[in-house]
Amino acid sequence: MGALPLGGEASPLSIKKLISIRKNQLSLWKQKNLPETELTRRQQAIIAAGHFDAYNYWLFQNARPDEFTQWVGDHQPEFQAWRDWQDKNKFTIERPDLQRLYFLKR
């Protein structure tokens, strides 16, 4: 769903395009008032803190190492701010969401 606004422009998939897709997906999730999960709450917190781009480059660095290296070279302060934020805001699962998501599909 998140890739629909990109139309045929989604391929080839870059980290920058993934960021757009993932932001769109979170926005649609919220618009459709779907139940929050630990992951969606975490991603919303990362967006609110201003680190979503850095988070995605960090997350996909092994899939696109050249893009990651280029981006970090140009955005070192933002990447360090993300790492600092991440160190202070560990991702922990408070409660399992799998069962709730299973019932949504039914």
Image (tube, grey):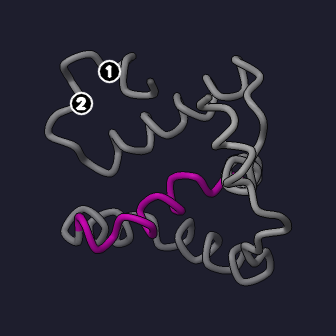
Number of marks drawn: 2
Q: Residues within 10 Å of mark 1 (few under 14, many from 20)?
A: few
* Horizontal relation, residue 84 to residue 36: left or right: left
Q: Nearer the viewer, residue 104 or 63?
A: 104
102 vs 32: above or below: below
Tell me if residue 52 is in the magenta stretch.
yes
* Amino acid on which disc 1 is placed: Leu
Q: Which image quarter is the C terminus in?
A: top right
Q: Which residue is mark 2?
A: 10
Tell me whether circle 1 and circle 2 mark residues in contact (CB < 8 Å).
Answer: yes
Residues drawn in magenta: 49-64
Tell me if residue 17 is in the magenta stretch.
no
Where residue 6 sits in the image (x, y, percent)?
32, 21
Where residue 101 sits in the image (x, y, percent)?
67, 43
Q: Residue furthest right?
A: 94
Tell me which residue sits at (31%, 67%) in the image: 68
Tell me which residue sits at (76%, 50%) in the image: 41
Q: Which residue is mark 1?
A: 6
Q: Secondary structure at mark 2?
A: helix
Q: Nearer the viewer, residue 36 or 79?
A: 36
* Amino acid on which disc 2 is placed: Ala
Tell me which residue sits at (43%, 34%) in the image: 21
Where residue 89 sits in the image (x, y, percent)?
79, 74
* Horizontal relation, residue 62 to residue 43: left or right: left
13 vs 24: above or below: below
